[in-house]
Structure formats: C-alpha cells, structure tokens
Image (spheres, rainbow, N blue to C red):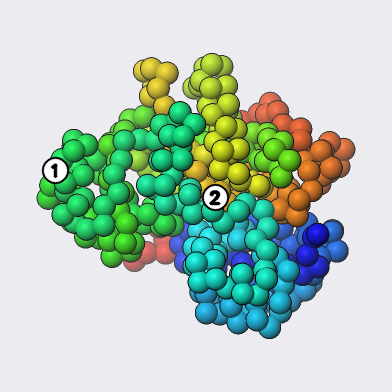
Amino acid sequence: NVPNKVLIIGSGGLSIGQAGEFDYSGSQAIKALHEENIQTVLINPNIATVQTSKGLADKVYFLPLVPEYVEQVIRVERPGGVLLTFGGQTGLNCGVELERAGVFKKYGVKILGTPIQAIIDTEDRKIFSERIGQIGEKVAPSMAAYSVQEALEAAEKLGYPVMARAAFSLGGLGSGFADNQEELKSLAQQALAHSNQLIIDKSLKGWKEVEYEVVRDAFNNCITVCNMENVDPLGIHTGESIVVAPSQTLSNKEYNLLRTTAINVIRHFGVVGECNIQYALNPYAEEYYIIEVNARLSRSSALASKATGYPLAYVAAKLALGIPLPKIKNSVTGITTACFEPSLDYCVVKIPRWDLSKFSRVST
C-alpha cells in the first residue's frame, strides 16, 4: 500500500547549518520516489537549492517550514504519505509539531519510514536515556532542566565541570562547558532562550568522538555503512571538527563493540531508513557512552555517502516505502544491492572551511 503522492519536507531557509547537506538528501529522495512512479510534492522556502530546481519534484511550494503552512499544503494536495527525515532538524521539529496537533491523522497522511515515536524518543533527552537504559546501554550521566535554578541544582549533583546544551536544537545552539556556577548561569540563560529544555551533562572533555551511520529496513535487516572519527575531541560540534572516515585509532575490538551496539540501538528504536549514532569513547579504557542518535539524515550522512559511494539518502527513501534492503540496487555501483556493507580501502578527511574574508576587520 504505497501512496501515489508523497509530501517531502525540504531543507529549509538559508541559515547557517540548515541548507546544504540536507538539500543533497532531499534531492536524492525525490529521484528515488520518481523511480517508483510516485508523485512528489516538496515544501521548501529556499529558491537557491537543487531540490527546488525545475524538473525534480512534481510540485514545489516555496513556503516556510512551519506547521500552519505545511497544513495548508496537505489540505490542498492531499498526499498519501510524508517524508520527515530528509529536511534535517527543521523538518523533524515541524513534523513532530504537526503530529502533536493531529494534522496527519486528520488528513489521513501516513508517516513513511521512521515512526514519529522513534523521532520523539531520540530527540527528548529524558526519554532517550530511559530507552537506551532498557537495552543495557548507557548515555553520559545527564539531567534535564527547565529553569536556571534547576540547571544549577543538576550541576551540583553531577559535579563540575559540566556541559550544558539545549534540547531539540540544530547545530549545537546554546551549548558549552561550565566550570562553575557563574559560567553555568550565563550559559543556561542563553540556552533557555532557544529551547524550553536544557540538558546538563557530566563533562567528558578529552574523550574520543566516534560516529556510525546505520541503515535498517522494515524487515529488520541492518547494516553499518560507515564509521567516522572526529580528530577534535568531544565537546567540539561535529559540524565544526575535522572528521576522518574510517576511524583511525580504534582497535578491532572497539570497532566491533560500537558496531554491535549501533545495530542494537537502531533496532530498539525501530528506525526505518538511515540513522546516525554518536559515541564518546574513553581513550584509556574500553568505556563508552552513547551521546546521541539522529533518526534522520544528518551532515555526517552526506559525508558518509561521498566517502563510501553508498547513496544513503536514495536508499533511505526506498526503505521508507517498505522496500527491503536486498531488493534495492546500489545506484552508484549498478551491480551490488543495498545490503552490501561498503569496504573502505582509502581514507576520507573532512575539514571545515571558515570563509573569514566575509567578515570585516578580520585578518585572513
């Protein structure tokens, strides 16, 4: 029962951290749906993207990614299904709001791919740590706070230094380290301006940051496509740190330990499609914590696709339609199916580029 018409929530307006990588995943998804003869409706306010180009989507609405506008498009177009995981954090947040408002139910729109509950479970830090605990894994010791006072109390319990960050945020908005009450106070005030929930984590400064990209279909077949290691230690946002694929300093035991965990986690949450999982790994002991799970295509997915030649967004769109992994052909190799784990016999490095010439009074 594949819908004939699917709504894709696009990559959003042109603000830092929001457009580029998610434009890539959205345009790949549109191509994948066309191959299955499905009509595509795209909502994206950004004219300067590939996905809004002529000839890609059947219909494009240049509207903001906010529930009021998306509901209007649903009312007019009456799509049978919707893809939420191809527009980055902005698209996800919008989808969660629409679900809570009962809009999808009202118009009979089916959420394709990862169930909305899995998205909420991975985004809400409190539920996330409970769900991770159910399978015997650990997240970094942390507490959720809803006010500055609660944040200070949480830090007293965990012990300084701590890391504070806002929940449901894009690109690590409003986060940082605090060594004492004063620093935490100013951080908490900033973060609570962006979000109503603040996470206080025990600081894991100096630990390695390792990521895995995992793919799962509706029939519980699961593979890890790529693993990456951040050259910069934990605490520097993935988007801003140098990343190497495959990881360079993990032992075989550590690699397989984290791989097995990644597959257990994605199965436990019931993610269908693509998922990114980030770990903090102690450099001196076999000890790790799960930092977060992104049940969507992330910046790292774009890097992993380019590094491995495995078209993650294309495959994730097909999986969302309920097609099993062995039935999907790898569009890059043209021979193998999507259930082959790519082997990396080379090394890929991503280095962020800061275009300082755009700023006045900066020595370039």
Secondary structure under tag 2 reads helix
Could you tell me if residue 73 is visible in this image?
A: yes
Residue drawn at x 74%, y 62% as measured from the top left: 30
Residue type at tag 2:
Ala
Q: Relative to residue 213, is residue 140 drawn left or right? A: left
- Please tell me whether mark 2 or mark 1 is closer to you in this view: 2
Where 42 sits versus 284, above or below? below
Q: CA distance from mark 2 to mark 1?
A: 35 Å
> Residue at 66% across / 47% down in the picture?
273
Mark 1: secondary structure? loop
Residue 65 position within the rendered picture, expressed as x and y whole percent measured from the top left: 54, 72
Side of 208 relative to 72 (left or right): left
- Where residue 103 appears, as percent x and y from the top left, is 57, 73
Q: Residue beneath label 1, please?
A: 180
- The answer to which of 176 and 137 lies nearer the viewer is 137
The residue that label 2 is drawn on is 118
The image quarter containing residue 83 is bottom right
- In the displayed structure, 156 sits above or below 354; it is above
